Structure formats: C-alpha cells, structure tokens
C-alpha cells in the first residue's frame, strides 16, 4: 500500500506526534514496509489452523515447593546486642 505525505502527517496528528518535515519520507517508507508485512500475513493460509489464546496453552512446567533454607532467626538474634520477643531493638534515633 502506497502512502502519501499527507497520510503520514495526518497519522502524526492523530498520534499526537510532532513529525519533522525532513523525516516524513523515512517514516513513510517504514510505514509502507509494515503495511506490506500485514498484507503478507493476511494472505497466509489458516484454514486448518486452530486458534489459540496463548502459545503455551496454559501449561507451565513448575517445580515442587520445597524448603531450601532453614529459619536461622534464633542464630542471628544471638549475634544482636538487644532482642525482645523476636524483634531487634535499636537505640532511639529521632527525638
């Protein structure tokens, strides 16, 4: 599909993009390439192809949940200066 400079300018206005006059021909060429690709995709034979919502069809190989680390809270709290009811106590910083 061939585009005109006015088409590119109008697309820029609709997309709220400031298109520089010097780049219109480059943008026009790129848009024509995209439209050509769309035309090629539309001609693909999809008669016996079943539509799908997602390429993985909802299957995900997941690993089992396993505990990989032990709870070392008590060991770490032994290293602290002041602990109360499992919480680290720190000096007051703000008056």
Image (cartoon, rainbow, N blue to C red):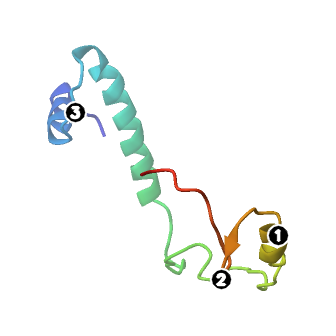
Q: Is residue 61 left or right of residue 58?
A: right
Q: Distance from label 2 to label 3 (Cα)?
A: 41 Å
Residue 90, image x, y percentages: 61, 59
How many angstroms separate mark 1 from mark 3 (CA)?
Answer: 62 Å
Disc 1 crowd rating (10 Å Cα; few below 14, some 14-19, many 20+) is few
Question: Between 80 and 51, which is closer to the camera in this rendering?
Answer: 80
Name the element at disc 3.
loop
Q: Which residue is mark 3?
A: 17
Q: Pointer 2: residues within 10 angstroms few (<14), some, or many (20+)?
A: few
Is residue 26 left or right of 92 when viewed as pictured?
Answer: left
Relative depth, front residue between 1 and 62: 62
| Of pointers 2 and 3, the one earlier in the residue sequence | 3
Of marks 1 and 2, the one in the foreground = 1
Towards the viewer: 83 or 65: 83
88, above or below 22, in the image:
below
Q: Secondary structure at mark 2?
A: loop
Q: Position of residue 94 (x, y in %)?
A: 45, 51
Residue at which label 1 appears: 78
Q: Is 22 above or below relative to 33?
A: above
């Amino acid at each position: 599909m061939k585009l005109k400079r006015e088409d590119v300018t109008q697309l820029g206005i609709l997309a709220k993009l400031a298109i520089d006059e010097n780049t219109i021909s480059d943008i026009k060429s790129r848009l024509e390439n995209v439209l050509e690709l769309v035309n090629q995709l539309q001609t693909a034979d999809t008669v016996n192809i079943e539509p799908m919502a997602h390429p993985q069809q909802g299957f995900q190989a997941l690993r089992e949940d396993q505990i990989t680390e032990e709870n070392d809270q008590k060991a770490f709290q032994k290293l602290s200066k002041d602990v109360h009811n499992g919480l680290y106590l720190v000096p007051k910083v703000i008056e």
